[in-house]
Image (tube, rainbow, N blue to C red):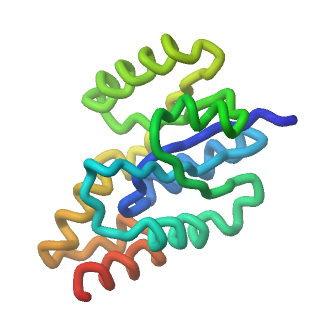
Amino acid sequence: MGRIAVYAGSFDPITHGHLDLVKRASVLFDEVVLAMGENPSKKYLLSPDDRRDILHACTADLDNVHVDSFNGLLIDYCRKRGASVIVRGLRAVTDFEFEFQIGLANMDMAPDIETVFLLTEPRNIFISSSLVKEIATNGGDVQRYVPVPAYEALMKAING
């Protein structure tokens, strides 16, 4: 069995920054699970089905990337999938403090699961799903920040 990595997020919507990390992780690991988190306390713009379809469409050309969803603790999900690595992206120093804290908590609860941080490509450093949703819901053009399937789903969700 190869080394399985999990890259988790809400992906509401997936951005070019997310997709870049997925592609780079797919070269580093035998299998990458793009795990869509379901957090009942979070308000999503896109439905779980829409997000799942978008993730499938955006990663269809990556043979070792699989899409799944989960709820609960990420380390429990990793154990269930047989994953030994959690992949996280870092955009800026502000991300580091939060990600470091979560990484340490995961390490404490599951010392056998490593967290690997990948640096975001400089051109994607300011892009986040929250920013994309804010711009899009206020009529701004977000085509350059998200893959086509995500853009189309966003426009459909916003415009009805």
Quick check: 82 above or below 50? above
Residue furthest right in the image: 1
Residue 58 in view in this figure: yes
Residue 119 in view in this figure: no
Q: Quadrant of the C terminus?
A: bottom left
Figure quadrant of residue 115? top right
Residue furthest bottom in the image: 160
Quick check: 149 above or below 23? below
The structure residue drawn at horizontal position 32% and vertical position 85%, both measured from the top left corner, is 156
The structure residue drawn at horizontal position 44% and vertical position 65%, both measured from the top left corner, is 48
Quick check: 23 above or below 77? below
Residue in front for this viewpoint, 35 or 15? 35
| Residue 44 point in image, percent of width and height | 29, 61
Quick check: 55 above or below 86? below
Question: How many numbered badges does the structure rendering display?
Answer: 0
| Residue 157 point in image, percent of width and height | 29, 80
The structure residue drawn at horizontal position 59% and vertical position 72%, both measured from the top left corner, is 57
Residue 123 shown left or right of residue 141 in the figure = right
Residue 150 shown left or right of residue 134 in the figure = right
Residue furthest left in the image: 138
The structure residue drawn at horizontal position 35% and vertical position 74%, both measured from the top left corner, is 143
| Residue 39 point in image, percent of width and height | 36, 48
Residue 76 shown left or right of residue 66 in the figure = left
| Residue 159 point in image, percent of width and height | 23, 87
Q: Quadrant of the N terminus?
A: top right
